[in-house]
């Protein structure tokens, strides 16, 4: 779901439902400007509205839901409220059905994530919007822009992360979940990641976006990023022969390329090359759709060596609609059992980015351990 009524979204999973009054007290350092009552959602009847970027009519909406995270859109006939909510981005813009399951399968930064998230029975959604406030969303002027002229996604993400860190202090909070970036972190993992990035004046890419690994064929692997759309940038993919490259080197390449784009580097176009893993050039290929869910445009990197990728890894895709490639409806590149001990080591991730710095007009406050 693209950005629209909502521009960013995060979530905190809880072991039991959170009372709205307790939630408001927990967020007392943020400026609450109102409370919205929903007539259509029995599981999430109330939303707290907080001030964010008031000059641009920006608001943070915090919605406690007395139900587990719905990882599918539901049916327009049997569950129309959920279907409409998904369609409008109320479960976070850029979120795509199955995001929680995929995040658990590919949670390299928190190995216990897939099992731990099963303990949740409720969740709290946090969204940023510039057209929704204390008024009824149907009352806003049609001429109101969805994004302000001074739109700054990094400021949104830092603000959301601070609110999430505050909610994770609550006794029944289990973890942070970023639906658009398909990231799961417990309280300690999120704070360590945010503190590291803050102290090195870096954007915490590994707290907002995920890097995933798939076995594509017997000899070829696929690695991709998910979540760069939060920065209004394309995600990245790399296809490579499994025996010729270390996953950690590919991961570092994709993270560095993402940081380069985020820092305002030259736009990567079809046919561009860059030196990458193996000390060889890698060629960029602009793709309409990724090889694995969620559907999204990507830049796919291919090593310029003696090996030619199989035809299915050179497919640029087509949107809409997004269709899987096998009759069972499963994505052919998903292989949760494919693992590598050297992949996504936390210390290695941080070292890859240590020498690069990002200038931020509104740096995040420290996230105390």
Image (tube, rainbow, N blue to C red):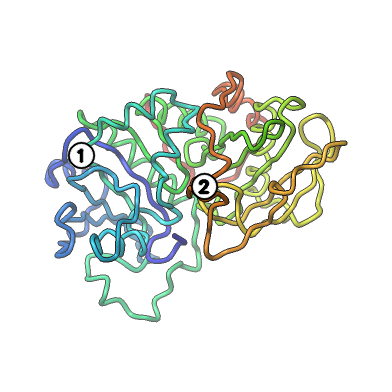
- Nearest to viewer (mark 2 / mark 1): 2
Instruction: Pick the quarter of the image with the C terminus.
Output: top left
Q: Residue at point 28% right, 38% down?
A: 13
Query: Which residue is label 2 attached to?
Result: 227
Q: Give above or below for 279 relative to 58.
A: above
Q: Residue at point 61% right, 56% down?
A: 289
Mark on residue 320?
A: none
Q: Residue furthest front?
A: 327
On the picture, is 46 further left or further right than 294? left
Q: Residue furthest right?
A: 306
| Mark 2 → mark 1, Cα distance in angstroms | 28 Å
Mark 1 and mark 2 in contact (Cβ < 8 Å)? no
On the picture, is 183 further left or further right than 220? left
Circle 2 Cα neighbour tier, 10 Å, few/some/many (<14 / 14–19 / ≥20) = many
Nearest the eye: 25 or 107? 107
On the picture, is 290 further left or further right than 250? left
Task: Estimate the x, y position of residue 335 in percent, counting from the top left.
Answer: 54, 33
Q: Give above or below for 140 relative to 81.
A: below
Task: Estimate the x, y position of residue 228 in percent, counting from the top left.
Answer: 55, 49
Nearest the eye: 88 or 83? 83
Instruction: Pick the quarter of the image with the N terminus.
Output: bottom left
Which quadrant holds residue 252?
Answer: top right
Task: Estimate the x, y position of residue 163 in percent, counting from the top left.
Answer: 32, 42
Nearest the eye: 249 or 243? 243
Q: Earlier in the sequence, mark 2 or mark 1?
A: 1
Q: Residue at point 80% right, 29% down?
A: 278
Determine whether the residue tagged by mark 1 lies in a helix, strand or loop: helix
Query: Which residue is label 1 attached to?
Result: 26
Which quadrant holds residue 287?
Answer: bottom right
Task: Estimate the x, y position of residue 137 in percent, counting from the top left.
Answer: 27, 70
Determine whether the residue tagged by mark 2 lies in a helix, strand or loop: loop
Nearest the eye: 222 or 272? 222
């Amino acid at each position: 779901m693209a950005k629209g009524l909502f521009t960013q979204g995060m979530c905190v999973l809880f072991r039991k439902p959170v009372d709205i009054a307790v939630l408001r007290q927990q967020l007392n350092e943020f400026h609450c400007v109102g409370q919205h009552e929903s007539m259509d959602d029995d599981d999430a009847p109330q939303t707290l509205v907080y001030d964010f970027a008031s000059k641009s009519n920006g608001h943070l909406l915090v919605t406690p839901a007395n139900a587990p995270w719905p990882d599918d859109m539901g049916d327009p006939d049997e569950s129309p409220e959920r279907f409409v909510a998904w369609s409008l981005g109320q479960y976070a813009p850029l979120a795509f059905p199955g995001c929680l399951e995929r995040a658990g399968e590919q949670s390299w930064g928190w190995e216990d994530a897939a099992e731990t998230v099963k303990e949740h029975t409720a969740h709290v959604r946090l969204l940023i919007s510039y057209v929704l406030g204390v008024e009824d969303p149907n009352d806003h002027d049609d001429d109101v822009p969805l994004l302000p002229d001074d739109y700054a996604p990094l400021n949104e993400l830092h603000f959301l992360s601070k609110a999430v860190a505050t909610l994770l202090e609550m006794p029944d909070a289990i973890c942070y979940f970023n639906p658009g970036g398909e990231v799961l972190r417990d309280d300690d993992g999120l704070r360590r990641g945010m503190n590291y990035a803050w102290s090195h004046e870096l954007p915490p890419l590994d707290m907002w976006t995920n890097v995933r690994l798939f076995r594509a064929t017997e000899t070829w692997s696929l690695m991709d990023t998910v979540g760069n759309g939060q920065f209004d940038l394309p995600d990245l993919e790399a296809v490579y022969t499994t025996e010729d490259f270390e996953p950690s080197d590919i991961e570092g390449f994709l993270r560095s390329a993402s940081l380069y784009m985020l820092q305002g580097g030259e736009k990567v176009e079809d046919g561009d090359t860059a030196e990458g893993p193996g000390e060889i050039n890698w060629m960029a290929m602009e793709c309409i759709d990724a090889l694995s869910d969620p559907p999204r445009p990507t830049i796919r990197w291919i090593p310029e060596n003696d090996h030619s990728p199989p035809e299915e890894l050179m497919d640029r895709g087509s949107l809409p609609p997004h269709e899987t490639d096998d009759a069972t409806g499963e994505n052919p590149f998903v292989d949760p059992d494919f693992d590598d001990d050297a992949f996504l080591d936390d210390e290695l991730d941080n070292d890859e980015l240590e020498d690069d710095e990002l200038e931020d007009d509104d740096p995040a406050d420290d996230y105390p351990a």
